[in-house]
Amino acid sequence: MPEIEEAIRPTADVAKDHVRAVYVAMLRARLLESKLSSLYKAGKIVGGVYLGKGQEAVSASLGASLIQGRDIFAALIRDQAGRTAFGEPLIDCTRTYLGSVLGPMKGRDGNIHRGRPRDGMPAMISHLGAQVSLVAGMLMARRLKGILPGTVGATCVGDGATSTGAFHEGLNVAAVEKLPMVVVVANNQFAYSTPTERQYACDDLLDRAKGYGVGGHGVDGTDLLACVSTIGRAVRLAREGHGPQLVVARLLRLVGHGEHDDGSYVPDTLRAGALGRDCLEVGQAQLVEGGYATAEELERWRTDAAEEVQAAVAQAQQEPAPDPWTEVWEACSVKLSTEGL
Amino acid sequence: MPEIEEAIRPTADVAKDHVRAVYVAMLRARLLESKLSSLYKAGKIVGGVYLGKGQEAVSASLGASLIQGRDIFAALIRDQAGRTAFGEPLIDCTRTYLGSVLGPMKGRDGNIHRGRPRDGMPAMISHLGAQVSLVAGMLMARRLKGILPGTVGATCVGDGATSTGAFHEGLNVAAVEKLPMVVVVANNQFAYSTPTERQYACDDLLDRAKGYGVGGHGVDGTDLLACVSTIGRAVRLAREGHGPQLVVARLLRLVGHGEHDDGSYVPDTLRAGALGRDCLEVGQAQLVEGGYATAEELERWRTDAAEEVQAAVAQAQQEPAPDPWTEVWEACSVKLSTEGL
Amino acid sequence: MSVTYVDAILEAQETLLRDDPRVFLYGQDIGKFGGAFKATKGLAEKFPGRVLDSPISEDAMMGLAVGAAIEGMRPIVEMQFADFSSIGFNQIINQAATHYYRTGVPVPLTVRLPSGGTPGSGPFHSQSMEAIYAHYPGLVVVTPATVSDAYHMLIDAVKLDDPVIYCEHKFLYRWLKSNRINGDGLPIGKARITRPGKHATVVTYSAMVHEAVRAAERLKEESGWEIEVVDLRSVKPLDIDTVLASVARTGRLLALGEAFPWGGVTAEVVARVCADGFHLLDAPPRRLNARDTPVPYHPKLWAAHRPTPESICLALRELLAF
Amino acid sequence: MSVTYVDAILEAQETLLRDDPRVFLYGQDIGKFGGAFKATKGLAEKFPGRVLDSPISEDAMMGLAVGAAIEGMRPIVEMQFADFSSIGFNQIINQAATHYYRTGVPVPLTVRLPSGGTPGSGPFHSQSMEAIYAHYPGLVVVTPATVSDAYHMLIDAVKLDDPVIYCEHKFLYRWLKSNRINGDGLPIGKARITRPGKHATVVTYSAMVHEAVRAAERLKEESGWEIEVVDLRSVKPLDIDTVLASVARTGRLLALGEAFPWGGVTAEVVARVCADGFHLLDAPPRRLNARDTPVPYHPKLWAAHRPTPESICLALRELLAF
Ligand SMILES: Cc1ncc(C[n+]2csc(CCOP(=O)(O)OP(=O)(O)O)c2C)c(N)n1
Ligand SMILES: Cc1ncc(C[n+]2csc(CCOP(=O)(O)OP(=O)(O)O)c2C)c(N)n1
Ligand SMILES: [Mg+2]
Ligand SMILES: [Mg+2]
């Protein structure tokens, strides 16, 4: 697979564009999400809102390391930035949150459950951990079709999701099959309100990699450049045939679990500490200091992103809601009986 | 808990008696099981027969390190020796296999599913891994009642069972709660016909201990003295408050998965190698060489055990089968309605 | 001062923790945080060490509860949503449900399942799983529809020596209020005539009791029909005697539920009534369930997915017209 | 030369693997070993890389199958016993069943569940889970009772674009033989009149079809009654038209099943017949199921736990006497 290797191995130039692209995705996601938050507070959203604030560097680094149209990205609850980096249009998000029937889920499912499975973006179910084996299966299919190597499948989970049997079974199966898979654990120190000491007893979730026989990579999730390089390397290793790679990113969720939650259980000391840094601010400084972008570029990106968000919201808001009268109430694709039962 | 520590900390003498007791349990189990095997071939058994041949050293070392009436032993599929060492009377086994209504399960469940939950021996369900959290719960109950420390809960699983979500969730919960629990993995290289390379991808299942934040202990499961000391230490550490301990014993199942299976998928090279040693023979040699027992004693133990097995079989064979007419067909202990539905 | 349905659940748990040292609570975020729906608010502080946050491990949560129950404790497990009990399914149906029959040792645990649909909750936060659990011998399945039942049936569930699946309806949590918790002493296993009538019987449970009453009121106003509403309260055991007595009075049966249409409580009710009270029926019995798709996310779809007063009225009119 | 029921399953899988490159098999011990029941014997050698041994991870097995199906493959997953599908339950009902409705992308997978009781198998190797899966929108549930159906319905299941739960009865594996596999072309979703009759209809499926036929023969011999036996073949969709047509002829219905008595197929059948064919019934419909306890281990208890020709005859005599 030499040509694939080349395509993603960062040369100095590629790396620069890549970092810029990651940052832009983070920025677009952040602005979109803060808009969603306002809309939620204004009662304009259908259902709950779950944001990825503080996790954009991790998520976008992953999304941007994957190749849309070839790879698989099973985004999870806090992956707006990764989705954006992977190439999901913002309108998929606003349509879903605002209940447009034109969204990818047609109003049948909502918010972060959206996806386009045929475009390498499976639509998550709520049950945590369940997407790990699903991605493994998508990769198995490709192997059976003879189109592996060449594809990477990736998914993100939280620290809490590592306690699920599904996570364990899925990662283990992927390891047994030596699939080109990347599982990123965004360890944001809490699962809803539950701190990590009630979730696991090991020193570092990274200690699990060896037990599964997979590659292990730890990273400071607030550090954009570190995320780009570590997650990029994990994706590359998977792509090059080294089997599943487990990335554990340390960071903090800078919002509540959902917008209904103020996250007041997160101690101030944590917020004030290194984990509480805002990866977008860190990234911005890194971009300027490292000469990846100028202050003007940053400003323009922000303006562009704000306009784009505005447009995506405006468009979705004008679109019709699903109509129960024209809804096709069928759970199977094939009609075997007149009644459906 | 000083008095408990004393009770099990092997002094020279205690250690000798302890090793002898372990060996006797192994022997009794072996003879009982070979009798069960003959009975199975003669069509005298109700249902399937699952034996622990080759795993007696591991199992009995565990059973003998636990204190009946105080500790919990959730025996699994290949734990006849551990059950015997823990104190389960042989008649519980023969009654269950021969379908006597006087057995602990009254004919409602069979073979290795028997137990006496009120005496610290939960009755396993078939679903692998499920007993891990159950034992954790029994220990939690004791902690809540204020009678922890002082108790150890132990269970055995196979290499195959480590792939279950239940094993993962259960061990993780035990670790989070820092429960005095010992989980012994009898890695007998196969899960039914499936070799370990289709089961997991790590070098050694022991590598998992760190990922759960629990103690880890590896042992050659064919070596009686090694098992006694390693498993004894794991139990002691659990009892002394060091949280869950994971023991991984390397060995080989010297029989088929069940007596219906000839195990022909096990390569001869494995059988002929170090893992294929018979722990009972190894143990016998160790006993004699180490001065733990004389040849006469060994011979007497064998005769006693054979008689005991014969008696347990003879007794169970005379006993009545369950009678559907007098059977109490009730799944709940409380009768809430006349119909039960 | 009024008590909501979720307050009643909180209060019942407080009472149980206070009065019975064997009781403890186990679930995700139920400790200091007080639970996703605040059904355990303040309890961790009041009962230190007895209200425990669990990892996201529904299988282990249930296995742990069975183990504790075997040892004589009375665990109450909160599933964050009923839908996630699918992960604890194996431990519930194979470990908890079979234990008494297999060993003679009962398993006194209670699983709280925040159940049923609310607008915008979608396919994985809206499920009604009572029929799944009721299928299994060894489980008791209750579905309180009132504030008082929410309280008393939880107390009774925990007192029962057998495993109880306690299905609490999320839609009722804050919407349903009562001036006080006043029990009428009905035990688990007994249904209640929520609204007496004489022209047709609606047999239902949980949130649908209220939709049925609404439909009944509408039909009364509009056309003078007197619809009797029977609240099953527990779906297993199912109080067929009360149902039959009602059908004997009205001659007409509508079995109503919010769950999926294949099988389930409504099928069991109709099948039982037809087997035991065939001669009582003056018209073919009817069923009304949710539609045969996952529960949709968008409120507009959701409202058309489950039975509503409108669709209940429609079904009743057809039943009455027979 | 005769073909057994399990041979038919093996042969169907061989045909599928041969004719459709999208098909692969996944399950515990199904590779070189050929499966716990030898339903995949020789296939790993004939189709290298397409018959894969899985770890003991039913949740992941099902998740993997869904993922592969989304990508256009046609996985067949063998559960070692239906009972262990309780671990794959979440992936089946939440991932597979909801996928088409949620995303518009169908999930063409088949899960083979070795189901039902055999003497000495006990509570965890004897379960019938068809009713559990049939409750969920998005799943098709089939229950072949004949050698030919075992073959053809498996072929049809794999060809179907939707997830199919294929319940194969372990009791029939080697006991049921046929001279050849001769299909009658019935598709999934259509029931079959296995034995025509005129005095009563037994609606049943899977192994109980044979017990019903035995009972029918006995009643014919002993008293001249002509009992019609309807084999549902698939329990979801359930072919109520064929059932109603039969009941229209006989006026009497016994719904018979091997599963637990609360809910399930028999409740659904009775409820549907009563709703749609109330006027066709000359007697109250009856149900006969297993007893309401876990499936007992000892053959003597087992034989009294599930319906037998004797208990079916008894139920039919009461039905006929009405
Ligand atoms: C199996 C399962 N149990 C419970 C839940 C409810 N739930 C949704 S998100 C969440 C917390 C997740 O924590 P984590 O995995 O750390 O991800 P984070 O929200 O921190 O990104 C919980 C408990 C669920 N979705 N799935
Ligand atoms: C969840 C689950 N899936 C499948 C089975 C069927 N089964 C019974 S024993 C067994 C193999 C177990 O292997 P291992 O855990 O290594 O134990 P061993 O038999 O080698 O002692 C399997 C697959 C089961 N009991 N539980
Ligand atoms: Mg988290
Ligand atoms: Mg093994």
Image (cartoon, coloured by chain):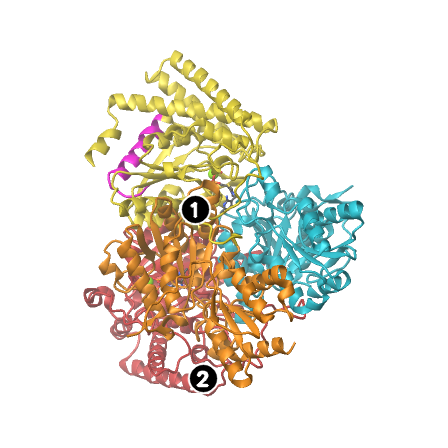
Chain colours: A red, B yellow, C orange, D cyan
Q: Chain of mark 1?
A: B
Most foreground residue, C271 or D7: C271
Q: Quadrant of ligand 3?
A: bottom left
Amino acid carrying label 1: it is Ala
Gap between marks 2 and 1, in whole Å?
Answer: 47 Å
Q: Name the secondary structure under disc 1.
A: helix
Q: Check mark 1 vs ligand 2: CB closer than 8 Å? yes or no.
A: yes
Determine the residue positioned at 37% across, 48% down. C69
Quadrant of the image occupied by residue C19: bottom left
- Percent coordinates x, y for residue B33 in the rendering: 50, 27
Q: In the rendered image, which residue does mark 1 sit on?
A: B130
Quadrant of the image occupied by residue B28: top left
| Mark 2 and mark 1 residues within 8 Å of each other at the beta carbon | no
Say whether residue B251 is magenta.
no
Quadrant assignment for the C terminus of chain C = bottom right
Say whether residue B241 is magenta.
yes
Determine crowd level at label 1: few under 14, some 14-19, many 20+ residues with C-alpha closer than 10 A.
many
Q: In the rendered image, which residue does mark 2 sit on?
A: A316
Compared to residue B81, the image places residue C6 above or below, namely below
- Percent coordinates x, y for residue B291 in the rendering: 32, 16
- The reply, left or right, for residue D188 in relation to residue D77 is right
Q: Residue furthest top?
A: B296
- The reply, left or right, for residue B20 in relation to residue B190 is left
Q: Would you say residue D243 is visible in this rendering? A: yes
Q: Magenta part mainly helix, strand or loop?
A: helix
In front: label 2 or label 1: 1
Q: Total of numbered circles in the picture?
A: 2
What residue span does the magenta drawing correspond to?
B225-245
- The reply, left or right, for residue C48 in relation to residue D281 is left
Amino acid carrying label 2: it is Ala
- Percent coordinates x, y for residue D275 in the rendering: 65, 68
Most foreground residue, B172 or D131: D131
